Image: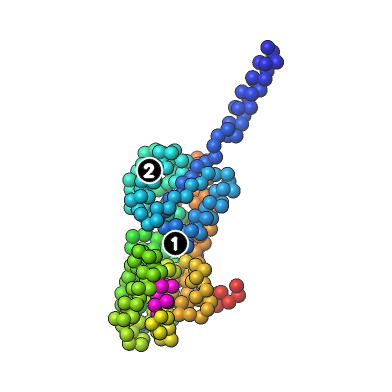
Amino acid sequence: MLLLRRMMLLLISALLVFPTMAQDAPTVAVLTPFLAQPGTQLMVEAFEASATDKGWDVTVIDTNEDIAALVSRMEDVVLQGVDAIVINVDPTQIAAGLQAAADAGIPVFGMDSGTDPLLATNVTSNGYSMAAETATYVVDRLNGEGNVVMFIFEPYPPVQKRGAIARAIFENTLDITIVDAITPSFDNGPLEGARNAMEAVLLANPEPGSISAVWAAWDDPALGALQAIEDAGRADEGIVIVGIDATEQARDAIAGGSNFEATVAQDFSGIAEKVVELIESHLAGEEITQVNHYISANLVTAADLAGE
């Protein structure tokens, strides 16, 4: 009996000393309607890699641009009792999901999202500075004079900011005229939507030199505009194209000497890793007071790619 009692005491002691060994790893759900977008893919993959290294259980949910479905799936993971939620979407569009998480005491982190009182914090690139760099690049290349087509996307805060700053810079340049500000169709992807829209712009402005530049809030519309310009036989007009994100296709187009001249390289891995760091801090009981955490981004031109 004495031996049995000692064994029971040892077992109880082991469970008390090593309680975390018996607990499940932290569970995190990542939700986005934009997984088809290259930048989102890179962030989500980097987040999974970093979180997996820490032994976390990560579930990725993509609703293929369906915001209503995202709210429903968010409510599902709240009911499952995950430890944290990461979103890559405008938080104002998923208020019901955010409230469900808040009511359950589950922290929600933005990964290149917007800000909201119900978010623990948001990690993103500085959209203002990225737009300023690309817009001023256009102004300088045109010597402050010409007609610019903009491709924007108002429903997503990080991209909306870019359009607002670029527009302000163009409108503050006396001899720059914004011909059109286009939100490309997503029916078959923004690249094809931008190509179709750019074809219409070119048809409406057939004279050589009538379009001087295309400013795009991200790379897919810039690439679509490039295809339309090349297909219309107007590449030799010197239409300057810029984008943001530095996707592989964009880099190839820039390095190849096309009309696509500049983009901005966001540190998508850096964004994702910062989100992981902040979740870890939050789960450890640390208070997060900063609303936005900005990760640096850099302008990329053909000269930058020449040495790669």
Amino acid type, residue under disc 1 in the picture: Gln
116 versus 161 height, above or below: above
Query: Label 1, on which residue?
Result: 37
Using the rendered view, name the quadrant where residue 214 is placed.
Answer: bottom left
Q: Residues within 10 Å of mark 1 (few under 14, many from 20)?
A: some
Pick whichever, 20 or 140, lies toward us.
20
Q: Quadrant of the N terminus?
A: top right
Region rendered in magenta? 221-229
User: What kind of colouring is applied to the model shown?
Assistant: rainbow
The answer to which of marks 2 and 1 sits earlier in the sequence is: 1
Residue 224 is a magenta residue: yes
Using the rendered view, name the quadrant where residue 15 is placed.
Answer: top right
299 versus 23 height, above or below: below
Q: Quadrant of the C terminus?
A: bottom right
Residue at image point 45% right, 54% down? 111
Residue at image point 44% right, 38% down? 81
Query: Does residue 38 appear to the left or right of 114 in the view shown?
Result: right
Query: Does residue 46 appear to the left or right of 74 in the view shown?
Result: right
13 versus 105 height, above or below: above
By secondary structure, the bulk of the magenta-drawn segment is best described as: helix
Q: Residues within 10 Å of mark 2 (few under 14, many from 20)?
A: some
Pick whichever, 305 or 287, lies toward us.
305
38 versus 285 height, above or below: below
Residue 215 is a magenta residue: no
Mark 2–mark 1 Cα distance, whole angstroms, equals 24 Å
Q: Secondary structure at mark 1?
A: loop
Seen as rendered, the residue at the extreme right is 3
Position of residue 82 measured from the top left corner of the image (x, y, whole percent): 46, 41
Amino acid type, residue under disc 2 in the picture: Glu
Looking at the image, can residue 298 be seen? no
Q: Tell me the number on the disc at residue 75.
A: 2
Position of residue 196 measured from the top left corner of the image (x, y, whole percent): 35, 73
